Amino acid sequence: MIKRIVNRWIRRKTKNLTKIPLFTMTFDYRKYKAQGKKDSCTMHCHPDIANDVFVKEKLQEVVDYIRDNYNLDIFYKDFEVRYV
């Protein structure tokens, strides 16, 4: 029963296995407010590319670029307005 539910959830999130995310980036607003930009964004990679050093470095550059060049308060304020 659990396996069936998990499989259905996976198919729903991946559009019936046609769109599979390679990486996701999450932003922790509480950490951002408490500690600043350092460690406020977390990146999760697909298991097949997670051990590739080159890909990890490039994706880390993307995360750093977003963290350095965008006002992260805007992301939170926009989310707060829509979902609160």
Image (cartoon, rainbow, N blue to C red):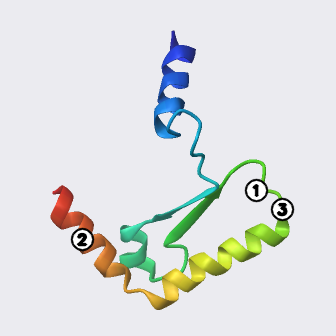
Residue at position x 20%, y 56% from top? Answer: 83
Q: CA distance from mark 2 to mark 3?
A: 34 Å
* Disc 1 to disc 3: CB gap under 8 Å: yes
Residue 19 figure quarter? top right
Residue flagged by tag 1: what amino acid is it?
Answer: Ala
Instruction: Return the residue at label 1.
Output: 50
- Measuring from the top left, give residue 25's x and y in whole percent: 53, 63
Residue 17 located left or right of residue 80: right
Depth check: give the residue in front, 59 or 20.
20
Q: Residue furthest front?
A: 18
User: As drawn, which residue projects farthest toward the bottom?
Assistant: 69
Q: Secondary structure at mark 2?
A: helix
Above or below, 6 against 49 in this view is: above
According to the picture, the residue beneath numbered tag 2 turns out to be: 78
* 80 relative to 11 in the view: left or right: left
N-term-proximal mark, 2 vs 3: 3
Q: Is residue 22 above or below residue 18?
A: below
Residue positioned 51% across, 9% down in the render: 1
User: Callout 3: 10 Å neighbours few (<14), some, many (20+)?
Assistant: few
The residue beneath circle 3 is 52
Provide residue 70's location: percent of width, then percent of height: 42, 86
Quadrant of res 50: bottom right
Q: Secondary structure at mark 3?
A: loop
**N-term-proximal mark, 2 vs 1:** 1
Residue 69: where, in percent of width, then height?
47, 90
